[in-house]
Image: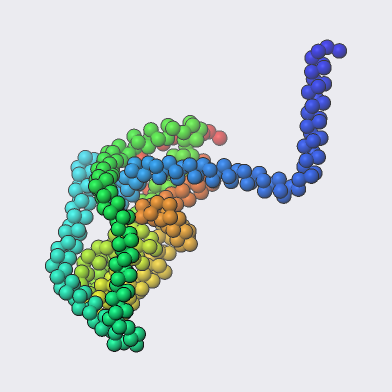
Amino acid sequence: MTGSDDKRRGAFLEALRGRVVSTESSEVVPRGMRVATAFAWRLLVIAAAVGVGIWLIIQLKLLVIPLLVAILVTALLWPAFTWMLRHRVPRWVAIVIALVGTLSIVSGLLWLAGWQVARQWSSVQDRTVEATGQFRDYLIQGPLHLTAQDIDGILSQIVSLVQEQAQLLLSGALAIGSTVGHVATGFLLAIFILLCILADGGGIWRWTTRLFPRAARPAIDHASRAGWVTVVNYARTQMLVATIDAVGIGLGAFFLGVPLAVPVAILVFLGAFVPIVGAVVTGAVAVFLALVYNGPWIALWMLVVVLAVQQIEGHILQPILMGSAVKVHPLAVVLVVTGGAMIAGIPGALFAVPLSAFVNVVAVSLANKSWKTGHDPASADLIWSTVPRQRRPSR
């Protein structure tokens, strides 16, 4: 018998012993536990990868936030921008019109809000002092029967609490310069990224798809197109919902005689881009102004207006408009907004819904293998519309 035969016999005996040991271990460990263990370590690997990704995003937040802001603003401008391109407007002219128009609208709204605040601030301040005095008299003469010493004691406790946090407030004040510098840098970076996307979105996307293996490019291209259509629909729908909320609450404040109706409407418009949380916070500001300036009855009617507008948004606008545009359940919206706020604060709450909608559509498109059917996303407003279609694999 040759040496090669001995080696083959040894390998066979080793494989046989391993199979026997594997069979014995499979008999000892129940099948359910083996399946659960297989799922567990895979889930641990996925969780670790997600955790590392979130950690990298937090570390690079000064780059990631301007990038996401630029993408979201691009989605807001894209319908009007592509409309100009379809009507033979030169690309550079369309870019100038889109940017100048956006900056003009935002600047006009901020100027209008500042003008009304400056115009009514003195009366609001006087009325606030008067309302505070009335509330103090109510605490003393009302059913609570507090004394002036009790009220002064409560105020002194509040002052002492603020003094205890003086060091934190001071450190925050010292960090303002750095924060302002970061905001200015992020703003300029977002503008630059926005210009690059509008000018050469197709080239950027073509370069991005080359990072993936050649066989995966058709799937990545198709799924990302579908995700981008969803983001554009989300931005367009959220703009409509925010406008309706701002008009409804602003008109309610105006007809009820609540001061600063225009700034309140602008605040509601901006806050509506943060789902759930923004509407609650901005509505509370409107009710608080009505309570301080107009009294409890007008504040009650302002609360009715805010609740009515939010109910219309939550039960009519969001299910009909946002549901068809984003295809994310309202429960999922609440959860992702809360999780985004816990992880990244206001930016996390702002970008949670569009990111989750994008990931959802991309995952569904990849799972359905819809790129093999030859049906591209039904939209002409694609950021990479100039990108040549990837050649589909032959069957």
x 43%, y 64%: residue: 319
Q: What colour scheme was applied to this rendering of the protein?
A: rainbow
Residue farthest toward the top in the current orientation of the protein: 2
Q: Quadrant of the C terminus?
A: top right
Q: Can you give x and y, in whole percent of width and height, for residue 368 in the image?
A: 54, 46
Q: Can you give x and y, in whole percent of width and height, for residue 160 in the image?
A: 31, 66
Q: Relative to 41, say whether 318 is above or below.
A: below
Q: Can you give x and y, in whole percent of width and height, for residue 243 in the image?
A: 29, 63
x 30%, y 83%: residue: 147
- Foreground: 386 or 74? 74
- Place residue 292 in its image quadrant: bottom left
Q: Quadrant of the N terminus?
A: top right
- Foreground: 266 or 378? 266
- Place residue 20 in its image quadrant: top right
x 36%, y 67%: residue: 280
Left/right placement of residue 173 relative to residue 43 reads: left
- Foreground: 78 or 168? 168
Q: Is residue 89 visible?
A: no
Q: Can you give x and y, in whole percent of width and height, for residue 376 in the image?
A: 44, 44
Residue farthest toward the right in the current orientation of the protein: 1
Q: Relative to 332, say whether 264 is above or below.
A: below
Q: Relative to 11, say whether 69 is above or below.
A: below
- Foreground: 371 or 346? 346
x 40%, y 51%: residue: 344
- Place residue 297 in its image quadrant: bottom left
